[in-house]
Image (cartoon, rainbow, N blue to C red):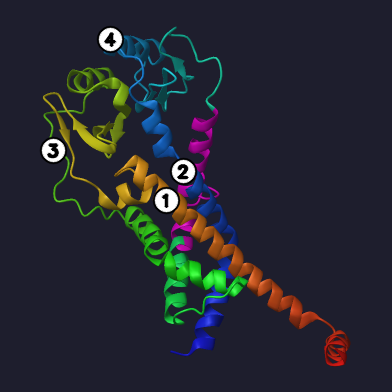
Amino acid sequence: MNKPLLLTLHRWITLVFALPLFAIITTGLILSFEPLMQINGIGGPAIDAARVVELVKTYDPHNKARGLSINAASQRMTLQGSGAPAIDLVTGAPAAASSGPTDLFRWARITHERLLGQAWLVTSSTIAMVILILLGSLMGLPRLRNTLSGWHKGTAWFALPLVLLSPLTGLCMAFGLTFQSGGVPAGSGRPLALPDAIRMVAASHDLTHVISIGMRGGHMMARIYDGGELRAYAVNSSEVTPLPRNWPRLIHEGNWSALIASSLNVVTSIALLTLLSTGLLIWARRKLRKRRPRSDRQAGAAVVGAR
């Protein structure tokens, strides 16, 4: 392959997508800590299903909520799509103050999935990231040196499986590729109302391990931590059934193992930020070097010769 051509393409794609990539990678780094926060939040004081149902009916009398999320550690519940405030499960009153980490993760997820409100910008930037990684790989093995270029190339090669897997799984999610062996089990009749879904989930699972219950894709589903893994369950009037694993989503979000996968995602995000920042610094240094006046370069060479 023509290495100068590959280098030119690599450089210009980086410059064009630098800002969106920085936003996507930074929010991805923030979201890498979410599974750890969630796993530390489960298993708190017991949550009574009847109490949750009562509060749902109180704060959502017109059944507008699409679902709910639960934080067992802080004993808080949030109704999705109803406009209701976060609810204190102990007192039944609106929560006194918003939860900082929860709000941060919510902002990071919205930005990560719809940068500036545009999902296509995230998808196109992710495709650009894959192309950059492939172009860098085609330019050959690195010479490891303690320089910006050496750190850039060394990070790219040593972290290659991680930095390539992250955008690829993100694209699978964007294009709906799940690699699941089966679909959502067929339910009988219309989807359950939220209070009925809460009762069904509570009958077979501890609500302190539940992250969310709500409608997704026309089906009532629940996301529940089971053995350190965040599993998705279909909820209907007769049973709560585990769904086939959506491996691209599990890998990308770090939910296949909160402790291991979350740490790997942190490493991946740091590696991607290192690649982006060192690549831009290398370009900036070369650009500034070229713009130095010729007289300055000649003076510098004369000083070196005199020594």
Q: Earlier in the sequence, mark 1 or mark 3?
A: 3
Give the distance between the C-alpha atoms of the residues marked 4 and 3, in whole angstroms.
Answer: 26 Å
Location of mark 1 (residue): 265
Q: Position of residue 146 (x, y in %)?
A: 60, 72
**Mark 2 vs mark 4: which is more N-terminal?**
2
Magenta-drawn stretch contains 139: no
Q: Which residues are magenta?
A: 100-125
Q: Amino acid at mark 4?
A: Ala
Residue 254: in sight, yes or no? no
* Numbered disc 1: secondary structure: helix
According to the image, label 3 marks what residue?
185
Disc 1 vs disc 4: which is toward the camera? 1
Q: Picture coordinates of residue 167 (x, y %)? A: 40, 60
Q: Position of residue 84 (x, y in %)?
A: 46, 19
Q: Is residue 188 above or below residue 33?
A: above
Q: Amino acid at mark 2?
A: Leu
Q: Secondary structure at mark 3?
A: loop
Magenta-colored stretch includes residue 111: yes
Q: Earlier in the sequence, mark 1 or mark 4?
A: 4
Quarter of the rendering occupied by the N terminus: bottom left
In three-dimensional space, the C-alpha distance between marks 1 and 3, rounded to whole angstroms, equals 31 Å
Q: Label for residue 31?
A: 2
Q: Residues within 10 Å of mark 2 (few under 14, many from 20)?
A: many
Say which residue appears at 56% left-offset and 81% top-offset: 8
At x 33%, y 22%, the residue is: 43
User: In this view of the protein, which residue sits in the foreground, 186 or 46?
Assistant: 46
Q: Answer yes or no: do the residues labelled 2 and 1 have beta carbons within 8 Å? A: yes
Image mark for residue 50:
4
Quarter of the image where the C terminus is located: bottom right
Q: Is residue 243 above or below residue 112?
A: above
Q: Amino acid at mark 3?
A: Pro
